[in-house]
Amino acid sequence: MVSNDPYAQVAKGKLKLKGDSGIKKKKKNKKEKVLEQVSKTLDIPEQNEQLKSELKKTKAEMAYLKMKEKMQTERIMEKASLTHKQRVEKFNQHLDSLTEHFDIPKVSWTK
């Protein structure tokens, strides 16, 4: 007998994937979760790795990084010392000091 239900031949239930072996991960208990969170917040392994990497650097690398940090702080202080209005005025003064050679030439189709 034929039913009028269009979904009569559809398979019901979970899909079975080819690579699915049915292995489930072991769930962690609450103590392990708390210990994991504490270790993440302390970041002890990261600090140890950072110290080890600093010890492996040569004198030249250390000097380079020190100068790079110094230059970066100077650049930040210089930018922070001027307001936007002062920077615009300084830029306008620079543009005024340029010769007309650097002006954009007029382009016209009529002349």
Image (cartoon, rainbow, N blue to C red):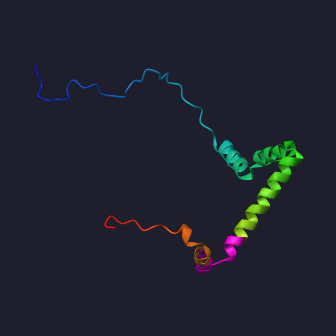
Q: In the rendered view, does 72 fall on the left or right side of 85?
A: right
Picture layout, residue 48 above or below residue 18: below
Residue 8 locus on image (x, y percent): 19, 26
In front: 99, or 35?
99
* Rendered image quadrant of residue 97: bottom right
Q: Residue furthest right?
A: 59
In front: 46, or 110?
110
Residue 101 included in the magenta stretch of the image: no
Residue 90 included in the magenta stretch of the image: yes
Picture layout, residue 12 above or below residue 79: above
Q: Which residue is painted at 20% across and 29% down in the image?
A: 7
Q: In the rendered view, does 110 fall on the left or right side of 29?
A: left
In front: 8, or 40?
40
Q: How many marks?
A: 0
Point out the stretch of residues depicted in magenta: 78-91
Residue 9 locus on image (x, y percent): 21, 23
Q: Residue furthest front?
A: 111
Q: Quadrant of the C terminus?
A: bottom left
Residue 93 locus on image (x, y percent): 61, 78
Q: Main secondary structure of the magenta part?
A: helix
Q: Which residue is painted at 77% across and 59% down in the image?
A: 69
Q: Quadrant of the N terminus?
A: top left
